[in-house]
Structures are given as C-alpha cells and as structure tokens.
Amino acid sequence: MDSGRIEELLTPGFSITPRKSSVPGEQWKGQFTTIQQSGQCLGCGRTLESIHLSSEEYEFLKGKIMKDVIDGGDQYKKTTPQELRRFQNFVKCCPPFDIVIDGLNVAKMFPKARESQVLLDVVSQLAKRNLHVLVLGRKHMLTQNSRWRKDDMEKVQKHASCFFADNISEDDPYLLYATLHSGNHCKFITNDLMRDHKACLPDARTQHLFFKWQQAHQLAITSRHPGSKIIFQHILNYDTVVQTTGDSWHIPYDEELVERYSYEVPTRWLCLHRKT
C-alpha cells in the first residue's frame, strides 16, 4: 500500500470501507481498534513488533550515544570535563543501577507539593521494592529552604545513591550515561523528551532506535495520591510506530494529528489487512 493511501486513511473523519488499494487485484479491509498490553491487535489478532531492542541493537545504540551525545555533544557548555569525569568514575565504582532519577525534574512534577518531599516519596517507594536507585541532582538541592528540607534530602540519600552536580550543569547527559552504563534492564524517570539529544544522533536508524529505547525505559509518573503513593505508567511491550507485515498495517491514530510524547501511548489504532 502506498504512502498516499495511508495518508488518506489517516485523515480525521475518514470512513473505513473495504476498497481496492493501489495494487491491482488486491483488496484491503480496515477498522479502528485497540492493542492489548501483550501487543495483540483486537481487530486482526496479530501481535505488534516488540518495543525491546535486541542485544546487538542495544550495544550499537549505546556506542552511538556515548560517542555522539556524551563525548561529542555540547554538554561542556553547561558542565566541565572534570565534573563529567568525576561522575563517570562515580558510576563505575557503583553496582549497576535499576532506576536513574532526574531529581530536579521529578521534584517539580507536582508544583503544589514541597519539592524535596515529592522526590523523597518517589525514592522511598522504589526503595521498598529493593531497587538500586541513583538520584541525579544539583548542589542547591542540599541547601535548606522552603522547597528543599534538609531532613528530606538526608532520607533521600539514605535510600538511594546520589550525585549532586554544579548548579549550572545539564542533567540529561549524566542520566543517559548512568542508564546505559547500568545495562538494558535499567529504567530512568524524567519528563524530559530529550529531543536535543536525539537530534545529535547521526542518522534516521539510530534516532529510531533511540526513540524505541526511550519508550521501553522511560518511566512516567502519572499521579501522586494522598498518603504519598506514586503511580507509574505501565511500559508497553510493543512498539507504537507504523508497522507492516506486507499483508497488514497497524497505524497509531491521534485525533487532529497531535504529537505524542515518548511516554504517551496511542489509544486508537488503524488496523488494515489484505482480504483473502
């Protein structure tokens, strides 16, 4: 099926009816559908492509990010080679992490709450699951004020490994380095979309692998309930990009072509399959 036909089918308000495709003698049937957590389409029963990278893809992507983002990016505009080396030595001396947290980003997710308390709530909940957690922060977070209480931060440091960079430093390169260095099991928590870092990667294939890795490893916090319980969004087992097997297409469908964040999941899909 050609790209023009797909664009026609993606037009909001389009009515799906069986009709001939651009290939003579073939017919396609389409319907809007949903995808189960397992990745199985409720429309046709096929299973979508896994979100998880193969070991070869992971090592390829890790090498590219280390070269083009960590070593070759513009991080030295907001940090120093000395601090980056200090962080790299810190990570190498620690066992692999299970979760890496952008501490400042997470602390600001709920503006009405005290920032140090939000961070403590997240870290405490993860620590109860016996997860090895790394919190990346800035040095100003250790200074007592109305948003950052010293006793909260002492508890954070009790439950997690912590690295506090200079206040002008950029957190993302540190987060990427620690997550990738820890292995393919490691997840990270931030609301940052990392578009700038994706743009540093040299080609479309590497950028696609980065987005796929990001979807499989970025934990999103959806809510914080009374009693300090944090709710995390479930990470999918399937990829959320357009997929085809030759005789079927699965296309994520967003009303009015709204752009989704890396951790946002399409709720509607267009399922197309060739009639036999």
Image (cartoon, helix red, strand yellow):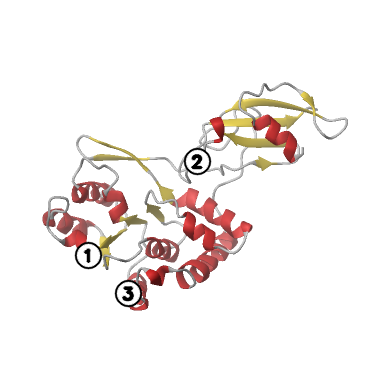
Q: Secondary structure at mark 2?
A: loop
Up-down relation of residue 248 to residue 61 (above or below): above
The amino acid type of the residue labelled 1 equals: Lys
Q: Determine the secondary structure under disc 3.
A: helix
Q: Quadrant of residue 245?
A: top right
Q: Position of residue 227 (x, y in %)?
A: 19, 37
Crowding near pointer 1: few (<14 within 10 Å), some, many (20+)?
Answer: few
Question: What residue is pinned by disc 2?
Answer: 260
Q: Residues within 10 Å of mark 2 (few under 14, many from 20)?
A: few
Residue at screen point 61% across, 40% down? 48
Residue ID for mark 3: 83
Alpha-carbon distance for marks 1 and 3? 13 Å
Q: Residue 56, position in %: x, y?
A: 59, 62
Q: Amino acid at mark 3?
A: Glu
Q: Amino acid at mark 2?
A: Arg
- The percent coordinates of residue 18 (x first, y second) are 75, 22
- Residue visible at 30% across and 45% down in the picture: 109
Q: Position of residue 4 (x, y in %)?
A: 74, 37
Identify the mark at residue 55; answer none if there is no mark: none
In this rendering, does residue 35 appear at all? no
Asked whether residue 235 appears in the rendered view, the answer is yes
C-alpha gap between disc 3 and disc 2: 34 Å
Q: Is residue 220 placed above or below 266 in the rendered structure?
A: below
Residue at image point 36% right, 68% down: 78
Split into 4 quadrants, where in the image is the C terminus?
Answer: top right
Which tag, 2 or 1, sits closer to the chain's start? 1
Q: What residue is pinned by disc 1?
A: 139
